[in-house]
Image (cartoon, rainbow, N blue to C red):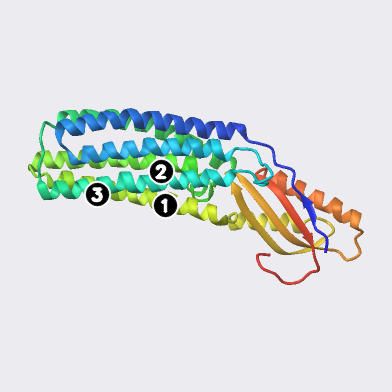
């Protein structure tokens, strides 16, 4: 059995990569400045929620460093040892970033919240904390606005909603920044509510509860991002709608009678590998099969520029999986 193979890389998308780098850098700079301010306010006020927010922002800052490394390492060109490129390495670093958020951010916040409830100590005034929370909210809003703009632009390009894009995108760096910034804004609101209730009631329990809830919020974000990256590292297929469109495009080639088996795999952010068993008409010459393979690749690339490799295996028609 012969195999027809077409593996010319798809056109690069430098603008999208550059936008992701910019989103990560803006988020990292904002988180670094905010973490220092929160730490100072937390030490001055003794607020558990503020110290948890400082840990939150510090964890986010380190996370941005990992995401920046992910973007740079994932775009290395293919070589003999890695013929499909280094795209999956970006998910390794993004997974490490999610783990760090889980350990450093969520762990510290929950622990410190529990200790505050047990000990019930609070020193200093609340004004510094409120000022820092307000400034931090403004700074995080800028970072979130940039991430949201990128998500909406990509969603429009792929003719889907922002939620649909976030569920299915393989660019986990922009997904991480989006969810971390969203969690940061929610965490700031929670910290303010906890401080306010503690000040009004005179009970530091509310401050501790706010810290615990912030930690649980970070835990949810870490689990979502970790699961997303782990699934991609294992070898995730494209969404079913895209799978069906690829199968239809292959079946639409004139000399193709059926596509018994179709496999797809994401090999990097925005990069896809397609492998299929294709049943060609029995009376078609070998030269026409080669022409048909070229036509099939052209159709797929026209529909999805992210398809980098296409492997087609001529086979007799029969039932198969993923067809």
Residue, disc 3 = 110
Q: Residue at x 38, y 49 (%)?
A: 222
**Real-space Cα separation, disc 2 to disc 3, in angstroms:** 19 Å
Residue, disc 2 = 179
Q: Quadrant of the N terminus?
A: bottom right
- The reply to whether dot 1 and dot 2 touch (C-beta < 8 Å) is yes
Q: Residue 35, how many percent across, how many down?
A: 30, 32
Q: If you read the primary sequence from the N terminus, does the residue marked by circle 1 or circle 3 appear first?
A: 3
Identify the image quadrant of residue 322: bottom right
**Real-space Cα separation, disc 1 to disc 3, in angstroms:** 18 Å
Q: Residue at x 76, y 59 (%)?
A: 251
- The reply to whether dot 1 and dot 3 touch (C-beta < 8 Å) is no
Q: If you read the primary sequence from the N terminus, does the residue marked by circle 2 or circle 3 appear first?
A: 3
Q: Residue furthest left?
A: 202
Residue, disc 1 = 224
Q: Residue 207, how many percent across, how many down?
A: 17, 43
Q: If you read the primary sequence from the N terminus, does the residue marked by circle 1 or circle 2 appear first?
A: 2
Is 252 in front, or is 215? Answer: 215
Res. 195 in view: yes
Q: Residue at x 18, y 28 (%)?
A: 128
Q: Secondary structure at mark 2?
A: helix
Report crowding for label 3: few under 14, some 14 to 19, many 20 or more residues within 10 A (C-alpha).
many
- The reply to whether dot 2 and dot 3 touch (C-beta < 8 Å) is no
Q: Secondary structure at mark 1?
A: helix
Is 40 in front, or is 160? Answer: 40
Q: Residue 299, how many percent across, how many down?
A: 75, 48
- The mark found on residue 314 in the picture is none
Q: Residue 59, how many percent across, how many down?
A: 34, 39
Q: Nearer the viewer, mark 2 or mark 3?
A: 3
């Amino acid at each position: 059995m012969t195999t027809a193979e077409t593996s010319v890389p798809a056109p690069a998308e430098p603008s999208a990569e550059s936008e992701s780098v910019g989103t990560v850098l803006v988020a990292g700079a904002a988180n670094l400045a905010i973490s220092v301010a929160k730490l100072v306010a937390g030490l001055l006020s003794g607020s558990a929620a503020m110290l948890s927010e400082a840990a939150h922002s510090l964890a986010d800052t380190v996370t941005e460093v990992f995401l920046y490394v992910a973007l740079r390492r994932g775009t290395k060109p293919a070589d003999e040892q890695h013929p499909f490129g280094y795209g999956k390495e970006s998910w390794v670093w993004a997974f490490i970033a999610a783990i760090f958020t889980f350990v450093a951010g969520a762990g510290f916040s929950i622990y410190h919240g529990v200790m505050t409830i047990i000990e019930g100590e609070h020193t200093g005034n609340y004004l510094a904390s409120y000022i820092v929370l307000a400034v931090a909210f403004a700074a995080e809003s800028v970072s979130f606005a940039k991430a949201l703009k990128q998500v909406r632009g990509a969603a429009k390009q792929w003719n889907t909603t922002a939620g649909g894009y976030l569920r299915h995108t393989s660019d986990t760096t922009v997904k991480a920044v989006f969810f971390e910034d969203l969690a940061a804004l929610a965490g700031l609101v929670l910290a303010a509510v906890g401080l306010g209730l503690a000040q009004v009631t005179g009970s530091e329990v509310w401050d501790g509860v706010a810290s615990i809830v912030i930690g649980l919020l970070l835990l949810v974000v870490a689990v979502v991002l970790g699961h997303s990256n782990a699934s991609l590292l294992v070898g995730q297929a494209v969404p079913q709608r895209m799978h069906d469109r690829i199968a239809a495009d292959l079946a639409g080639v004139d000399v193709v009678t059926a596509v018994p088996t179709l496999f797809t795999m994401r090999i990097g952010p925005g990069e896809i590998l397609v492998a299929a068993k294709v049943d060609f008409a029995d009376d078609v010459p070998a030269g026409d099969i080669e022409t048909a393979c070229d036509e099939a690749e052209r159709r797929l690339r026209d529909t999805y520029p992210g398809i980098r490799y296409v492997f087609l295996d001529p086979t007799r028609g029969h039932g198969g999986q993923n067809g």
